Amino acid sequence: MSAPGRRAAAVLVAVATLALAGCTGGGDGDVVVAPVGRATVVEVVEAPATVAARATATLSSPADGTVAALRVHEGQQVRTGQVLLRVESPSARRDLRQAREADARASAGATAGPTVDLSGARQADAVAQRSFARARRAAERIAVPAARRQALSALRVSEAQYRSARAQADNAARQLAAGIGSLSQAVAALSSAQRVQTRAAVQLARRTVSALVVRAPVAGTVSLSAPSGGAASGGDAQALISQLPEGLQSQAGSVLGGSASGSSASVDGALVEGQPVSSGEALLTVTDASTLSLTAQVDETDVLLVRAGVPATAELDAVPDATYESGVESIDPTPTQSSRGGVTYLVRLRLGLGRQADGTSAPTPRPGMSAVVDLRVRTARHVLAVPAAAVFRDGRRDAVWVVDHGVARVRVVRLGAQGKTHVQVLDGVRPGDSIVAHGADQVHDGDSVS
């Protein structure tokens, strides 16, 4: 009766008594006849869910090096922007030094006259390419697919801008070699293009060195054991942003600033000073659990019934006797593949207070706990309702057995809200009609039913 993949439950509040009269038919069990009455039926969609923190960020190393200073300990509460650790990276500092030297030579060449030194531009180009490669590795480790795509897209834009500056320099050099235009004009164009190129390389290298001081992107609790799994998350996004040219940082930040937490590569055990780290490697996690929510995976067969504001309740595996009030806040438009191979949609719900079976307050959940949510997607009040067991499939249609003068006849019906015990009937029967409420599989058209 209900759509495949749906486990519906119903709350039935009787408005008119559905009196049941027992009688026997020709089958192995009892056939029960009951009159059609009115009731309130609440249809519920059940979905697995996970308790989510307000924000979680896994911070990663912006470059190869070692943990030079660790300023926090396990379980420490930190504020946004607080220094968590410092990574010492000789390679990142060497890149910055070389980029500055190349920029200085390009600047000197611009003021010296017709002689232009191309070695500075070539060195700056090598430094920039290493910085882009490092940023690309960090982007590819972002666990959230959408955030990873956006990060790589922002990086491609940055590389395109740099290639444009490099092309200007190459074009100016070719013009100079071919003798096109005046010498002074060609030298001026080449010098200007070189300065754009070398300044971009300095900026990239400077951002990487600045990111060696790792700060908390959100306020929360520190965990020195970063989650494992081989992909990086919010921290890698922050490291990537720090390596982009200044003009792209605000754009990339707006794209990646809300990226969800995910699993990431980590070292064995807790982070310690002196520990070697690689670019993009997860270091620690900061979790803001000041408010909690639920993320539920709703099957594609049910998601069209779900909308913002739908009330819900949640039961946690860790607190089996408690019920937590909840409600839908948003539905993610992007589908995901479920563990069973089907399509699901992420539904985000607020998480309210919980009550134990005895009425006492339930404990506060922790992020990552498993839950099951019951979404009350449809409520039909004081409507025609029949027992769910009375409805069967007649070909491709829903039907019930109507008992007319003691004889069972097929009656096609149109259903509304569908619950576990009772369902709403929109068309096909009238109040007071006698139907086979139980044992419908034992009845055939034309059977005598008393």
Image (cartoon, helix red, strand yellow):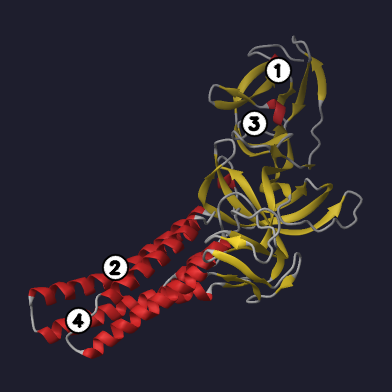
**Residue hosting label 2:** 163
How many numbered marks appear? 4
Percent of width and height locating residue 336 = 53, 46
Mark carried by residue 429: 3
- Amino acid type shown at disc 2: Arg
Q: Distance of mark 2 from mark 4, alpha carbons?
A: 16 Å
Compared to residue 93, the image places residue 403 above or below, namely above
**Front: mark 1 or 4:** 4
Three-letter amino acid code at disc 4?
Answer: Ala
Mark 3 is surrounded, within 10 Å at the Cα level, by few (under 14), some (14 to 19) or many (20 or more) other residues, namely many
Q: Are marks 2 and 4 in contact (CB under 8 Å)?
A: no
Residue at horizontal 80 percent and vertical 50 percent from the top: 323
Viewer-proximal residue among 430 and 184: 184
Residue 200 picture location, percent across and down: 36, 76
The residue pinned by badge 4 equals 189
Q: Amino acid at mark 1?
A: His
Residues at marks 1 and 2 touching, judged by CB atoms closer than 8 Å: no
Mark 1 or mark 4: which comes first in sequence? 4
Q: Quadrant of residue 326?
A: bottom right
Label 2 vs 4, first from the N-terminus: 2
Element under label 1? loop
* Mark closer to the chain start, 3 or 2: 2
Residue 432, image x, y percentages? 73, 31
**Distance of mark 1 from mark 4, alpha carbons?**
101 Å
